[in-house]
Image (cartoon, grey):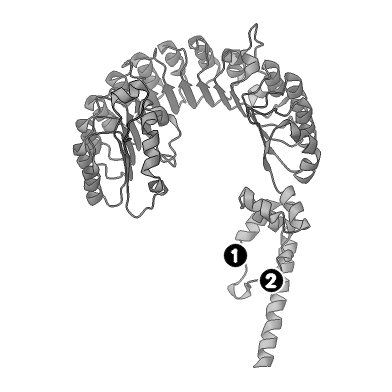
Amino acid sequence: MGQSQSINGRVINRRRDNSVDHLRRSMPDEDPKELRSFLTEKDVEDEECVTVSGDISILPDACLACIFQFLSSGDRKQCSLVCRRWLEIEGQSRHRLTLNAQSELVSVVTSLFSRFDSVTKLSLKCDRRSVSIGDDGLVLISQRCRNLTRLKLRSCRKLTDIGMETFAKNCNNLKRFSCGSCAFGAKGINAVINNCSLLEELSVKRLRGVGNGGVVEPIGPGLAALSLKFICLKDLYNAQCFGPLIIGSKNLRTLKLFRCSGDWDRLLELVSDHVDGLVEVHLERLQMSDDGLVAVSHCQNLEILHILKTPDCSNLGLVSVAENCKLLRKLHIDGWKTNRINDDGLIGVSKYCVNLQELVLIGVDCTRVSLELLATNCQKLERLALCGSETVGDAEISCIAEKCTALKKLCIKSCPVSDLGMEALAGGCPNLVKVKVKKCRGVTGDGVGWLRASRESLAVNLDTTEVESQDAVSDGGQDENPAAANQIEVASNVASSSSSRSTSFKARFGLIAGRNLVSCAFRKWSSFSGGSPCH
């Protein structure tokens, strides 16, 4: 028996050595893709598979680097403390780095990027109350990170146009550039787009240098005009100086404009004349009218459109978009309760946008008339949100339940809906998987119970908050007994992490949330594409 065990042990050891040699021969250190493909191969017979235990140092560097890629940042830091070899491999395999960009950073840039010499994605963020890194630090980083493809700057107020110009010349392989709350101006942005011919995404937010008085230098088009596919501008006083860049970006697919001053009708007309590949457009709090929407309607490839808080836009502009943009899949509208967009505009959408999959209506007074046409004609509609509408009641919900057979996720917020509407949902929408009801005073736990009994697989989130007295709101005081927010999570077979939130937390924020009726509805639908428009 002892001899047999010894022979078996030698065979296993021999197989282990052979498998290790095979690992070393088959996985070159410089090619992680080949490493990943090797790890998924099943060309070894079952009887030859051996579980190797013991010394982990037998793993090749490439294999160890691949493992590190699946770890969180904290776990990677812990692994780097194991030994010198792991420290070196962890540094060489780290491609993404986020740094506190205070002025003291410049003293450690050389040693820092000697260890992390393969960084391609860099984020520099500084606290608003601290002194940020300056031009000398940014230039030093650009000399050590020639292969950067992504750069994000936040609150780096000491950076100037000169520093940005030198950086752009050294790191001309940038594909994504984002800056917010910085102090450099148009020359700094022009330096980036004139030197980075591969730039695909540009995001600019609260750029102080562009907002200064006097004549503003036009931005663009530059070398990046041919490669740019994504432009996002937020909170800019002179955002129209980006006009030449937007117009000259022939391959632009996504344009997002948020809270930028100036008249945008004329610029949108020029954009539609020169850029014909736009697929996604976001327009929020802009000075624009139906003329701007008519210009957007010329983008016939448009699939995603957000029209948020543009009070001069009406049914006329929306119908024009619907008639010409027949590929529209996602439509978000915040009518700001001006009632300039209502049933008439939505009827136009229902007639022409038959591919619609996602519809968000906020502050839009729609009725059964338009909702029935939407449900009948838009057979692909899967995600629907109705927020802050005084005309959406039980009749409208019953219509949705009866007609929207493809609907999967529904959000109802601050609408005069009652338990009768919930009962209608219990018997309709056969593909419905999630319902969120927020601040609908007529909906109670009984309605949720009805849904629960009828649709065991349906996840229902009911959030009812009693609003404090008007006197307390007007006086700025607080009620002695704050209203509690009742959070009811009904998710059969699914455990919801949000159900653990305390009601006291919601009570503290109930009044604040009540004042802003639909502010949260514009966040990404993480539950619809991972979340919900009504958080």
Image x and y of residue 515, in percent = 37, 26
Q: Which callout, 2 or 1, points at the residue further toward the start of the chain? A: 1
Check the image and name the residue furthest to the front: 480
The residue singled out by tag 2 in the image is: 54
Q: Which of the pair 303/4 is nearer the observer?
A: 4
Q: Which of the pair 91/192 is nearer the observer?
A: 91
Check the image and name the residue furthest to the bottom: 1
The residue singled out by tag 1 in the image is: 42
Residue 198 placement, left or right of 449: right
SS at circle 2: loop
The reply to whether discs 2 and 1 touch (Cβ–Cβ < 8 Å) is no
Image x and y of residue 152, in percent = 64, 32
Work out which quarter of the rendered image holds the C terminus and state it. top left
C-alpha gap between disc 2 and disc 1: 23 Å
Badge 1 amino acid: Lys
Give residue 104's quadrant in the image. top right
Q: How many marks?
A: 2
Badge 2 amino acid: Gly
- Residue drawn at (80%, 43%), measured in percent from left and top? 114
SS at circle 1: loop
Q: Residues within 10 Å of mark 2 (few under 14, many from 20)?
A: few
